[in-house]
Image (tube, rainbow, N blue to C red):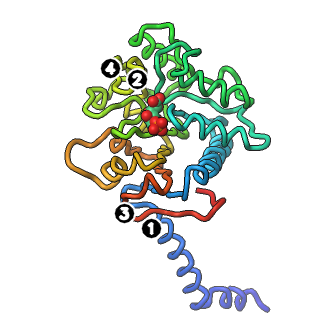
Amino acid sequence: MNCKYKIKNKFRPEVCFLLLTITAHHNYKDFKRKDMSGRRIVVFPSAADLGPALARLVTARADRACQSGSGRFSVGVSGGSLVGMLSKELTALPALDCSRWVIGFCDERVVPFSDPESTYGLYKDQLLCKINIPESGVLAIDPTLPVQECAEDYARKLRETFPGEDIPVFDLLLLGMGPDGHTCSLFPDHPLLEETQKTVAPISDSPKPPPQRVTLTLPVVNAARCVAFVSTGGSKAPVLKRVLEGGEGPALPAARVVPSKGELLWLLDEPAAASLTLPVERPAPGAQI
Ligand SMILES: O=C(O)[C@H](O)[C@@H](O)[C@H](O)[C@H](O)COP(=O)(O)O
C-alpha cells in the first residue's frame, strides 16, 4: 500500500467524524463534571467510602508535584474530623513515600502540642510518626509565642519554605468546614475575612474553642493549585446548601474559597449532600477523582 493511499485512508471522513465525536464527548464529560466556576462536587455513599478516595487524591497530587519542577509536594492540612480520616487512610497505604513532602497547617490552635486540642499534636501521634516525612518537612507553629508573634513566626516559616513567593502556593490544601460555614480559622462576619496583606493571621476570639489560633488567610487559600474540602455528616447539610447553592446574607467563609487558578473540589458523603439540588458526581468505587 503506497504512502499516499495510507494517508488518504487514515483520514477518511468517517474516521475523522468518529475521532471528533470521541474528543467532544470526552471534553463534554470533563466540562459537565465541573460547573461554571471549575468546581467539582463529588459525593460518596459514606465517610468510609470517601476516605480511600481522599488518600488516592492526595497521593496522585503528591506524585504529580514531585515529578514537577519543584520536586516536592506541599500540602496544608486542617484539624477536626479530617485528622482521623486522613491519618487512617494514609497510614493504611503500603510503601507511601513522604520523603519529599512538606506538610503545613491551614490553621492551628495556639496551645501546647501535648494539649488534645493541638492539631499538630494529633497529627504527630496519628500520622507524622508513622510516615517517612523529614522533620524539616513539617511546618509546625511555635505555641510558646503569644498569638500575634506566633502568626508572624509562622508566616516567616512559610516565606522560608516558599522562597520567592509573596503568597505561598501550596500544591494541595485540605479544608474542613464547620456547621457555621467557617473554614481554617476564618469565621463568619470576622474581620479576618477581609485580610489581604498577611499570609498568616492571629485570632483570639475564635467562636470554636480554643479561642487563640493562627490561620492561613484567604489570599493563601485561594492561591493553592488545588483546594479540597472534606465535609461529612448530616449536620453539614444545611450550611453546605447555602455555601454551594447560595443564600441570603454575606458569603460564608467556605464560600469565599474560590481558587484564582487552582482546582476546587468538594468531597462529601451522602448525608452532608442531602440538601443539594445542583449536579454532583458519584464516582464508581475505587475511581480516581
Ligand atoms: O482546627 C480546626 O478547628 C479546623 O481546621 C476547622 O476549620 C475544621 O476543619 C472545621 O471546624 C470542621 O471540623 P469538622 O470536620 O470536625 O466538623
Q: Which quadrant, please, contains the N terminus? A: bottom right
Q: Secondary structure at mark 1?
A: helix
| Labels 3 and 1: the sequence-earlier one | 1
Q: How far is mark 2 from mark 1, CA to CA?
A: 40 Å
SS at badge 2: loop
Residue 205 is labelled as 4
Mark 3 belongs to which amino acid? Leu
Occupied quadrant, residue 209: top left
Type of amino acid at the residue the image marks with label 1:
Lys
Seen at 54% across and 33% down, the residue is 77
Between the residue at mark 2 and the residue at mark 3, the CA separation in whole angstroms equals: 33 Å
Question: Who comes first in sequence, dot 4 or dot 1?
Answer: 1
> Would you say the residues marked 3 and 1 are in contact, meaning their CB atoms lie under 8 Å apart?
no
The residue where tag 3 is placed is: 278
Disc 1 marks which residue?
Answer: 32
Tell me, yes or no, whether the two marked residues, 2 and 1, touch with CB atoms within 8 Å: no
Q: Quadrant of residue 94?
A: top right
Q: Are marks 4 and 3 in contact (CB under 8 Å)?
A: no
* Tag nearer the camera, 4 or 1: 4
User: Could you give the CA–CA distance between mark 3 and mark 1, rounded to whole angstroms?
Assistant: 12 Å
Q: Nearer the viewer, mark 2 or mark 1?
A: 2
For label 1, the crowd category at 10 Å Cα-Cα, with few meaning under 14, some 14 to 19 and many 20 or more, is some
Q: Name the N-terminal-most of marks 2 and 3.
A: 2
* Residue bearing the label numbered 2: 209
Task: Compute the Cα span from label 4 to label 1.
Answer: 41 Å
Residue 247 in the figure: left or right of residue 152: left
